[in-house]
Image: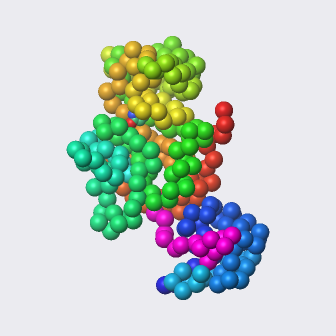
């Protein structure tokens, strides 16, 4: 195996961004074959060398990140007793990597789904307190007006009595069937459908177009996926959500 930089090894193994990996080295917390490495640019060979952070072995299992255009009809999980799951859409060479979907889209919903085997990153993106913004394109039955946008901005009360966090609504078209983009900061079960239901409107089409710094690639067709670019991975690692509200 070719040798790689120590900071690359650390970020690949989930130890944060490149600059965080450099900091770990500078702090003297990283050892290569038993010797402290302060210089994160030093090269190492994962096939023969031993890397440790705070005495813990750092495995070299490359993390992978896929952006999928989830099609309707698939369940956002790794297995399901009845329905097809998104994992079945992966090519054979990608299935063994044990990726899982970060968050869920309903079976009938479509759009951006991130799949990865990076557990800590998934955990950070899903942590409710981070309020990672998610944007959805929706079609609903009935007209949408500024009153609806105001109600969503204040926080509508869902069917179980929970008051949803404020959300932003951009109305694209209003009529017998309306179209809009809604940005929400939480991901409760059927969140968007229930928010519109509280306004007396039924969602007939739901497509996620972004999550945090990640936007659905318009070149992807339903059922297709691609690897994230280095820039997208770095943006996700550095992403901190909106913080506490
Ligand atoms: N809100 C919903 O109602 N469904 C989804 O799949 C995602 C957000």
In this rendering, the answer to whether 99 lies above or below 80 is below
Image position of 194 with respect to 2: above or below:
above
Extreme residue toward the left, this view: 82
The quarter of the rendering in which ligand 1 is drawn is top left
Q: Which quadrant of the figure has residue 103?
A: top left
Colour approach in the figure: rainbow
Q: Position of residue 242 (x, y in %)?
A: 64, 39
Residue sitting at x 32%, y 55%: 87
Region in magenta: 51-65
Horizontal relation, residue 220 to residue 168: left or right: left
- Pick the residue in front: 214 or 131: 131
Q: Residue at x 31, y 39 (%)?
A: 107
Q: Residue furthest front?
A: 55
Front in this rendered view, residue 50 or 3: 50
Q: Does residue 59 belong to the magenta stretch?
A: yes
Residue 74 image offset from top left, x and y in percent: 28, 44
The prevailing secondary structure element of the residues shown in magenta is: loop
178 left or right, relative to 72: right
The reply to whether residue 84 is visible in this rendering is yes
Q: Is residue 7 magenta?
A: no
For residue 103, side relative to residue 84 (left or right): right
Q: Quadrant of the C terminus?
A: top right
Residue 173 seen in this snapshot? no
x and y percentages locating residue 211 in the rendered image:
50, 43
Residue 228 pos. (x, y %): 47, 58
| Residue in view at x 69 percent, y 64 percent | 19
- Quick check: 96 left or right of 2? left
Relative to residue 89, is residue 61 depicted above or below? below
Please name the residue shown 59% across and 56% down the image: 237
């Amino acid at each position: 195996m070719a040798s790689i930089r120590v900071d690359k090894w650390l970020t690949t193994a989930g130890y944060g961004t490149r600059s965080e990996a450099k900091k770990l080295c500078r702090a003297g917390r990283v050892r290569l074959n038993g010797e402290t490495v302060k210089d994160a640019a030093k090269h190492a060979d994962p096939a023969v060398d031993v890397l440790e952070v705070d005495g813990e072995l750092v495995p070299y299992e490359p993390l992978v990140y896929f952006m999928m255009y989830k099609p309707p009809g698939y369940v956002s999980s790794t297995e399901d007793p009845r329905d097809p799951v998104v994992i079945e859409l992966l090519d054979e060479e990608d299935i063994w990597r044990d990726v899982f979907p970060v968050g869920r889209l309903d079976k009938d919903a479509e759009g951006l789904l991130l799949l990865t085997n990076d557990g800590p990153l998934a955990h950070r993106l899903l942590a409710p307190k981070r309020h990672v913004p998610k944007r959805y394109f929706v079609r609903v039955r009935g007209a949408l007006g500024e009153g609806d946008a105001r109600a969503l901005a204040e926080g509508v009360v869902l069917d179980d009595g929970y008051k949803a966090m404020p959300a932003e609504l951009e109305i694209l078209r209003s009529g017998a069937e309306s179209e809009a983009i809604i940005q929400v900061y939480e991901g409760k079960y059927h969140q968007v459908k229930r928010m519109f239901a509280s306004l007396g409107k039924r969602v007939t089409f739901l497509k996620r177009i972004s999550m945090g710094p990640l936007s659905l690639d318009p070149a992807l067709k339903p059922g297709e996926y691609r690897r994230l670019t280095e820039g997208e991975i770095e943006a996700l690692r550095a992403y901190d959500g909106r913080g506490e509200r």
